[in-house]
């Protein structure tokens, strides 16, 4: 496994493999790997000749009061884990390599970025779309792998690729969970012992919604009320949003039909956690 920090070297390396007829799979990450990240690497390993993983904590997607400075990092451990998954290249640029100053361009996907996390993290998805667009140029892979865990992010990337004609196939992989249901996240390290015990309630709330919806409940308000009940009066869980959304437009639903996303964001102390369950409801 080779670690590359320079974008020209990275691009030339991928291009060489492509010219030799190889398929390249790309997994963008912010590092501090857990089984969710590793599952994306495994999918990329299965489906491609060459696997590239980027590790870049992207300042552009953090708000001024967010956790950029505290975001957990452990490059050595990440490299060990990636190597064990058969990753061929780690792209680990410094911030100036990605954002030489002045950096004035932005990629904005409208319509699906205003709700859900977008309402609580202004500018976040613009930061995500901008860095992923750059990474897609630096690492011109045939396939790129994202997690369902960040459902809105996956929608934004899919739409950006469609609307801006990026020549890459976006694969969205299932959410990997802890045994108690908590979605794995680098930010779970922010949880203290008590918060960690309660954090699985986010998934429990979503599961309750799923059971109701799959049992035939079509009234979004009823499903949302049932999900809220799980988290209500839980000390230290501050819900930002919790509801049923159209799986494609991400707009709030009144009636559950077709592709539905049950989604939640909540603060537990310093940690802001998100989770979701996608449903396909037949009539
Ligand atoms: P991050 O390093 O948190 O930016 O995540 C990098 C990629 O891993 C994104 O595509 C995430 O959606 C994905 N990811 C994060 N957590 C999980 C998880 N628990 N299961 C599956 N994918 C995940």
Image (cartoon, rainbow, N blue to C red):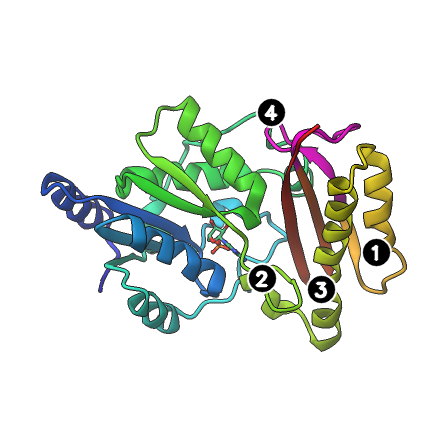
- The total number of labels drawn is 4
Give the crowd class for mark 4: few <14, some 14-19, many >=20 residues within 10 Å.
few
Image coordinates for residue 37, horizontal then vertical, percent: 44, 59
Horizontal arrangement in the rendering, residue 159 relative to residue 119 (left or right): left
Q: Secondary structure at mark 3?
A: helix
Image coordinates for residue 16, horizontal then vertical, percent: 12, 44
Q: Which residues are magenta?
A: 241-260
The quadrant in which residue 104 appears is top left
Horizontal arrangement in the rendering, residue 110 relative to residue 211 (left or right): left
Which residue has dot 3 on it?
A: 199
Name which of mark 4 and mark 1 comes first in the sequence. 4
Look at the picture and state if 111 lies above or below 133: above
Quarter of the image where the N terminus is located: bottom left
Cα–Cα span, label 3 and label 1: 12 Å
Tag on residue 177? 2
Cα–Cα span, label 4 and label 3: 30 Å
Name which of mark 3 and mark 2 comes first in the sequence. 2
**Which residue shows up at 52% across the image and 50% down it?**
174
Name which of mark 4 and mark 3 comes first in the sequence. 4
Look at the picture and state if 3 lies above or below 274: below
Q: Secondary structure at mark 4?
A: loop
Cα–Cα span, label 4 and label 1: 30 Å
Image coordinates for residue 45, horizontal then vertical, percent: 30, 55
Closer to us: mark 3 or mark 2? Answer: 2
Q: Is mark 3 within 8 Å of ligand 1?
A: no
Which residue has dot 1 on it?
A: 230
Along the line of sight, which residue is nearer the eye, 109 or 141? 141
Q: Is residue 251 magenta?
A: yes
Along the line of sight, which residue is nearer the eye, 17 or 39? 39
Image coordinates for residue 54, horizontal then vertical, percent: 34, 54
């Amino acid at each position: 496994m080779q670690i590359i920090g320079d974008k020209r070297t990275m691009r030339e390396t991928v291009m060489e493999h492509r010219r030799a007829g190889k398929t390249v799979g790309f997994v963008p990450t912010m590092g501090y790997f857990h089984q969710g990240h590793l599952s994306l690497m495994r999918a990329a390993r299965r489906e491609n000749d060459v696997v590239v993983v980027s590790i870049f904590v992207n300042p552009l997607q953090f708000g001024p009061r967010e956790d950029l400075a505290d975001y957990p990092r452990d490059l050595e451990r990440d490299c060990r884990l990636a190597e064990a998954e058969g990753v061929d290249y780690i792209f680990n640029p410094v911030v100036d390599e990605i954002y030489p100053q002045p950096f004035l361009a932005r990629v904005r996907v409208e319509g699906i970025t205003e709700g859900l996390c977008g309402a609580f993290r202004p500018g976040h998805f613009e930061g995500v779309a901008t860095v992923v667009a750059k990474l897609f140029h630096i690492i011109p892979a045939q396939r790129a792998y994202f997690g369902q865990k960040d459902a809105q992010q996956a929608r934004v990337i899919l739409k950006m690729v469609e609307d801006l004609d990026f020549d890459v196939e976006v694969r969205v992989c299932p959410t990997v969970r802890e045994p108690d249901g908590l979605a794995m996240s680098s930010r779970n390290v922010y949880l203290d012992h008590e918060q960690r015990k309660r954090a699985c309630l986010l998934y429990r709330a979503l599961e309750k919604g799923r059971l109701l919806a799959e049992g035939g409940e079509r009234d979004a308000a009823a499903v949302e009320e049932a999900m809220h009940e799980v988290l209500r009066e839980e000390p230290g869980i501050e819900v930002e949003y919790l509801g049923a959304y159209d799986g494609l437009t991400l707009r709030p639903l009144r009636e559950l039909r077709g592709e539905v996303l049950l989604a939640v964001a909540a603060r537990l102390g310093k940690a802001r956690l998100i989770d979701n369950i996608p449903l396909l409801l037949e009539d």
